[in-house]
Image (spheres, rainbow, N blue to C red):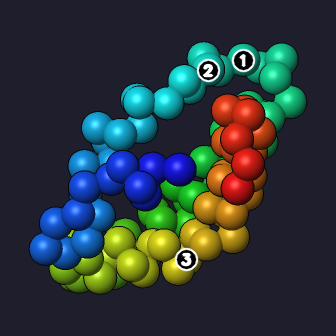
Amino acid sequence: MIKPIQTRGLYGERDIHRRLLMFPIPEFSGNDSRHIPLANISKTCRKRVSAISMILRGMSVAIARSTVKQLLAKEFEKIDKLVSELLGLSL
């Protein structure tokens, strides 16, 4: 959803932090059946990246980003699906 409006630099996409808030992101609710899975996936992602953090530190930003994207590809698919449902969008 962000890609069409995300700026690109010499090394790829950038300024994602500026684009996220352009979407109507609802406040977290423990009563929403989509929020808890998102929080759990987030914890999993953090643990997986933390486990390789020392390796990532020796890489350039672009290579580290690519490595993390590959590592978390399945989680990103799940996140995309849940967020699309939350925002009422289709993938």
Is residue 2 among the parts visible in the rendering?
yes
Dot in front, 2 or 1: 2
**Which residue type does callout 2 highlight?**
Pro
Q: Residue at x 35, y 40 (%)?
A: 19
Work out whether 91 lies above or below 54.
above
Q: Quadrant of residue 88?
A: top right
* Identity of the residue drawn at 29% across and 38% down: 18
Find numbered disc 3 in the image and state the secondary structure of the residue it sits on: helix
How many C-alpha atoms fall within 10 Å of the one at disc 1: few (<14), some, or many (≥20)? few
Please tell me whether residue 28 is drawn above or below residue 88 in the rendered image. Answer: above
Other residues around mark 2 within 10 Å, as few (<14) / some (14–19) / many (≥20): few
- Residue identified by numbered label 3: 71
Where is mark 2, residue-wise? 26
Q: Are marks 2 and 1 in contact (CB under 8 Å)?
A: yes
Seen as rendered, the residue at the extreme front is: 4
Q: Is residue 58 left or right of residue 4?
A: left
Q: Quadrant of residue 29?
A: top right
Residue 57 vs 27, above or below: the answer is below
The amino acid beneath tag 3 is Leu
| Distance CA(mark 1)–CA(mark 3) | 28 Å
How many labels were placed on the picture? 3
Residue position for label 1? 29
